[in-house]
Image: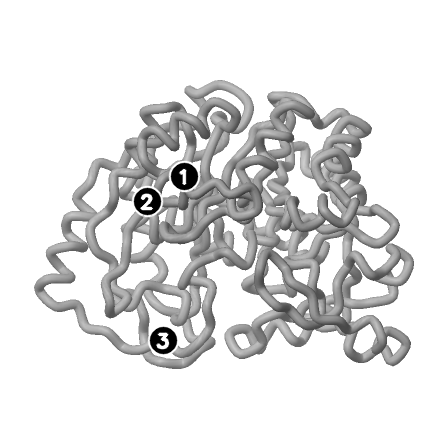
Amino acid sequence: MGTQESNEETSGTGRRALLGAAVLGAGGAVLGMAGTARADGARHGGGVRGLPKPTIIGHRGASGYRPEHTFGSYQLALDLGADIVEAGDLVPTKDGHLVCRHEPEIGGTTDVADHPGFADRKKTKLLDGVSTTGWFTEDFTLAELKTLRAVERIPANRPHNTLYNGRWEIPTFEEVLRWQDEQTRKRGKQVWIYPELKHPTYFRKQGLPLEERVAKLLRKYRKDRRTSPVILQSFEPTSIQRLNKLVDNPLVVLLSSADSRPWDFVETGDPRTVADLVKPAGLREIASYAQGIGPTLDLIIPRDAQGNLTTPTTLVSDAHKVGLILHPYTLRNENPFLPANFRKGSEADAYGDVFGAYRAYFATGIDGVFTDQPDTGLLARADFNG
């Protein structure tokens, strides 16, 4: 999942919030909704709709416990029982390989700054309209990236994860596809992955188009079919439309805050915002080339000025009416990432009442959720499904 995650992605300290009468009223409305997410996935047949509901998706693996997008994180997500592993935010190398990093800028997720030989690679670039300084995957060959090691991206929230800094290298997408097959054989159970194409327009303009590279690898490993255990996602609708012509995999359009515009829309002069895309007409259009949407949690249940949950929107029912599944992002255990009325204390690395938050979101009827702590999500699902 990308940088376009809304306020639940921002760091900072949580604060103690008592549930007032108004909040309790809103919460009661949330928790009182019909639990359509309890539907037994088995009755939907095979493929993505046959997964358990609500589906628990390990966000960048089990990134609450290990540095994200490493085989350590991916492996732990499976060990904890995740239904799907988001193995791969895909970005290209200088020589055209696809690697798994949160962003093309790797200063915050690797030890590249500790390599004097790469000091001159540090640059300032315009990434989807944002001036960004650091080291970028497209300026390194795969061999060079393999000399780096992953580190924890948000150490203030996850100091325990820093124990594993330097342990794992950067995985390639091809290595992930082989790992998926290996784990499926070892576990006797199909392993699912959920890679994201990062900044497709940005890379296409650099002569490093992502969609064709992804499709080529999926075809090589015979994972480009409608029932293949690989769901593809992107924040750029035109990227998903392009993939729809290249592969038959389940496809998901990611949606950021309501007032934002997908970067491909900015580049092409399309004036629509995410608020337009989540209207019935926008959802019908998405359903013509994709099977699902991945909205920020705030599009499911908005927050008020104090950060408390309010009343759910109609997005879940509207999307279901046109046949779209919903996998919103991202639930995390730590205080700063939770709605204010589910926080406990003010420590940046302390856990809040995440089970209460899961219950509220599950009650809206979502089909699944991205989470940094898959074990917590599975416990919450067991509670919810009774």
Q: Which mark sits nearer the N-terminus, 3 or 1?
A: 3
Q: Which residue in the protein does label 2 denote?
A: 362
Give above or below for 292 relative to 260: above
Numbered disc 2: secondary structure: helix
Question: Looking at the picture, does residue 359 appear above or below residue 160?
Answer: above
Do the CB atoms of the residues marked 3 and 1 lie less than 8 Å apart?
no
Q: CA distance from mark 3 to mark 1?
A: 27 Å
Image coords of residue 195 (percent x, y): 63, 43
Is the residue under label 2 in contact with that under label 1 (CB below 8 Å)? yes
Check disc 3 and give the amino acid type. Answer: Gly
Per the image, the residue denoted by label 3 is 14
Residue 144 located left or right of residue 379? right
Furthest-front residue in view? 269
* Residue 251, disc: none
Q: Residues within 10 Å of mark 2 (few under 14, many from 20)?
A: many
Instruction: Determine crowd level at label 3: few under 14, some 14-19, many 20+ residues with C-alpha closer than 10 A.
Output: many
Residue in view at x 31 percent, y 38 percent: 315
Q: Given the image, on which type of amino acid does mark 2 rest?
A: Phe
The amino acid type found where label 1 is placed reads: Pro
Measured from the top left, where is residue 294 in percent x and y?
Answer: 46, 42
Query: Residue at the spot x=36%, y=64% of the render?
Result: 338
Q: Is there any visible trace of residue 307 in the rendered image?
A: yes
x, y (%) of residue 300?
32, 46
Say how many tags the image has: 3
Would residue 185 be seen by someone viewing this image from the given angle? no
Give the quarter of the figure containing the C terminus: top left
